[in-house]
Amino acid sequence: MISKSYIYPQPAIARDRRGSIIVSILIVTLFLFTVVSSLMILANSNLSRAKGRIYLLQSQYAAESGADMAIAKLNADSTASYTGTAGSEVQILDNTQYRSTFTTTVAAGATSNERVITAIGKVYRPRNAVTASYVHKIEVTAERTSSSVSVAGMLSRNIIEIASSVKDIYARDLYVNGYINMNKNSTNLHAESITVAGKNTGAGNCSIGGTGNLVKPTSFVTPGQTKTKLTLAYNNCISPPGNTSNTDFDVLTNQTTLSKIQSTYIPWNQYMDSSYTNSYNACTDWTNGTFPRTIPSAGHTKQTQYPDNGSTISATCGTNGDLSLATGQYDITDNVHIRANLCAATACTPTFNNPSASPRYMFVEGSVNFDGVSTATGSGPIVLISYGADPASKTSVCPLGGAIYLGNGTVKAPDMYFLSINGLCLDKTKFGANPGFGGISGKNIYISSNSGSPFDPQLNTSFPFNAVPIDLSWHAALYRRL
């Protein structure tokens, strides 16, 4: 028999199952495709947002760089006249993907020691784009303030040299960047505290050296203090006490962390803002009228820029830039800015009076040549600041410079602080009061005063030293995004 094979038709349920599996696979595939596509879109979106945040952050950095540069420009300009980039974009980064820039404007703030900086940072992507893709705008309020170091009654940015003619000097505190040298064994330096941040380059590495004596004051202004404090970067070569503390002195030598004062420069616009205007007629307040002469004269409130608000000596003030003050009294009723030398041709002996309890500032563009000087009884504090160079004519008697020179006359000025950007020199000076002056500061200080004629040089310990700022600098005080 011949066997036959038969193909039996599959049941309908099997065919349905096979179709269902295909449909399921299609659905799963479509789902997975949708999930993968969504993840890719999400990842790409997150990547784009991340890039956007980076570029936006870069625009913020650009704006902050602009504000930092504006503050640096203000610190580099004693008149703080920088007004910004004048609309020009300053490029700070340029690569194949993008470039970043900033613009700044600097406007006057609420006070003369305040500037409002508006900085706009931009990122162009691609780098050759005409319009910025990312923009960040900030406002920074900058202030000019002093460092935490307070001015000392006697302060030098370099050297204090005491000549052999001096017997006794009395000061509450001294601060010296370089060193102190005394030239006679009968010279006595009385002080509550002495800080010296440098040394004499000679043998011994002396922060304080020479042949004089350090003397503890008979009484102290600082409550609770009983010893003179010596804080020195190197050695104390005056013995006693040398480098060892004793019953009269607390001695800290070879201190490696002492900071030096960077600047004693006080720009006149620190205390004279835009409300102060030019004098009505050059320098005639100083040269005309009977004594005492009021500065400014009646009816000319705040017209105290003599002759105007420029800088350096002006030939229109006094005689070719030399203002002679003779022997009269000048009542300083407001802050003044004088573009002249004081008494350059012939030394004078003026008297100054501040009828207010608030400090008054005299900013002198030139040098100061006083044989003697006084402050009137009851005067408020006066700070006299000289920007002038050391005159060559004083070299023989002032070896360290004499932009402020107090000569062979009588000084009776307990309410005046003398601050010279260059040298300050006391040449055979006599003192007619005790204390003789408020304080002294200079690049170098040279003291060659007459001993006890009738008084020794003594600083006024009650002078408001906080009215004399040092290490002035601009810094950011307030930041906000616009």
Image (cartoon, rainbow, N blue to C red):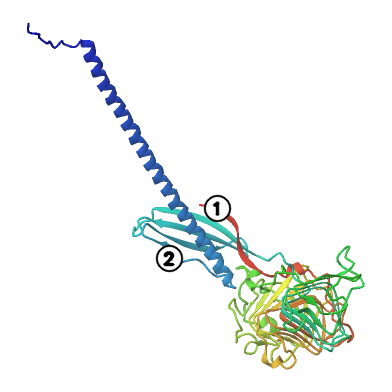
Of 449 and 81, which appears nearest the observer?
449
Residue name at image x 69 percent, y 85 percent = 403
Q: Position of residue 88 (x, y in %)?
A: 43, 65
Residue 292 visible somewhere in the drawing = no
Proximity of marks 2 and 1: CB atoms separated by less than 8 Å = no
Mark earlier in primary sequence (2, 1): 2
Examine the rendered structure and indicate whether residue 383 appears above or below residue 347. above
| Lateral position of residue 392 relative to residue 210, left or right | left
Q: Residue furthest top?
A: 1
Kind of residue sitting beneath label 1: Arg
Of 314 and 464, which appears nearest the observer?
464
Q: Quadrant of the N terminus?
A: top left
| Lateral position of residue 168 relative to residue 308, left or right | right
Residue at numbered disc 1:
480
Determine the secondary structure under disc 1.
strand
Question: Residue 88: which numbered mark, if any?
Answer: 2
Q: Position of residue 304 (x, y in %)?
A: 65, 75
* Quadrant of res 29: top left
Examine the rendered structure and indicate whether residue 77 appears above or below residue 183. above
Residue 306 visible somewhere in the drawing = yes
Neighbor class of circle 1 (other Cα within 10 Å; few <14, some 14-19, many 20+) is few
Cα gap from disc 2 to disc 1, whole angstroms: 23 Å
Determine the secondary structure under disc 2.
loop
Neighbor class of circle 2 (other Cα within 10 Å; few <14, some 14-19, many 20+) is few
